[in-house]
């Protein structure tokens, strides 16, 4: 994944609430799947496998975060297991069929979580972070983001 993408995801995570964090996790997963497809097209087997391993780790994180007190967790767990198996088959057979199957399933899930996140008005999970204001200034070819320090010190208070 490119450095700019990593910075974007880091910024998003610092500003996310519970619902939007799940959507960000899906976006990270899709970025890794896009990396896998690009590596496959470039016939770079090692990068293909690495991207699929990273995508699998995101799926494991999504699985581990499920709360089985609620009904949809069992179904989501089964879908995540299916997607992990498809990614493993793609890695073993060195083909994109399983990646396509996983993207189809995960795309529908991401859309559902995205609609749910739009209705969530809770505060961000991370506190004591920089505020990000986008669109206040523009560069020649891009949108600049300004970071506003809310306090002089960030981090842990002892």
Image (cartoon, rainbow, N blue to C red):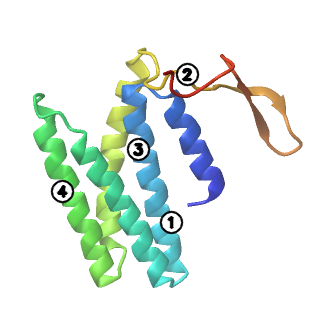
Q: CA distance from mark 4 to mark 3?
A: 16 Å
Measured Cα–Cα span from mark 1 to mark 3: 15 Å
Q: Nearer the viewer, residue 31 or 132?
A: 132
Nearer the observer, 15 or 26: 15
Q: CA distance from mark 2 to mark 4?
A: 36 Å
Q: CA distance from mark 2 to mark 3?
A: 22 Å
Q: Position of residue 51 (x, y in %)?
A: 44, 67
Q: Which residue is mark 2?
A: 128
The first of marks 1 and 2 along the sequence is 1
Image spot of residue 27 (x, y percent)? 46, 46
Q: Looking at the rendering, which quadrant does residue 93 occupy?
A: bottom left
Q: Is residue 46 above or below residue 14?
A: below
- Ranked by sequence position, the earlier of labels 4 and 1 is 1
| Residue displayed at 46% across by 50% down | 28
Instruction: Pinpoint residue 133: horizontal percent, then vertical percent.
Output: 70, 24
Q: Position of residue 62 (x, y in %)?
A: 28, 45
Question: Which mark lies nearer to you, 2 or 4?
Answer: 2
User: Residues at badges 1 and 2 in contact (C-beta under 8 Å)?
Assistant: no
> Decide: marks 2, 3 in contact (CB < 8 A)?
no
Which mark, residue 35?
Answer: 1
Q: Are marks 2 and 4 in contact (CB under 8 Å)?
A: no
2 or 3: tag closer to the N-terminus: 3
Q: Which residue is mark 4?
A: 81
Label 1, secondary structure: give it: helix
Q: CA distance from mark 1 to mark 2?
A: 33 Å
Q: What residue did someone put label 3 on? A: 25
Image point 49% across, 36% down: which residue? 13
Q: Residues within 10 Å of mark 4 (few under 14, many from 20)?
A: some
Q: Is residue 105 visible?
A: no
Crowding at label 3, few (<14), some or many (≥20) Cα neighbours within 10 Å?
some
Q: Is residue 141 left or right of residue 135?
A: right
């Amino acid at each position: 994944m490119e450095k700019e993408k990593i910075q974007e995801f880091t910024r998003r995570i610092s500003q996310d609430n519970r619902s939007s964090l799940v959507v960000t996790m899906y976006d990270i997963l899709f970025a890794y799947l896009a990396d896998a497809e690009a590596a496959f097209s470039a016939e770079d087997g090692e990068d293909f496998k690495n991207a699929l391993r990273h995508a699998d780790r995101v799926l494991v994180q999504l699985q581990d975060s499920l709360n089985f007190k609620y009904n949809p967790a069992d179904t989501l767990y089964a879908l995540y297991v299916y997607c992990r198996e498809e990614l493993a088959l793609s890695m073993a057979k060195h083909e994109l069929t399983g990646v396509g199957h996983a993207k189809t399933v995960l795309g529908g899930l991401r859309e559902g979580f995205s609609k749910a996140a739009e209705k969530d008005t809770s505060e961000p999970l991370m506190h004591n972070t920089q505020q990000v204001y986008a669109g206040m200034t523009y560069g020649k070819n891009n949108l600049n983001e300004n970071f506003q320090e809310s306090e002089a010190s960030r981090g842990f208070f002892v």
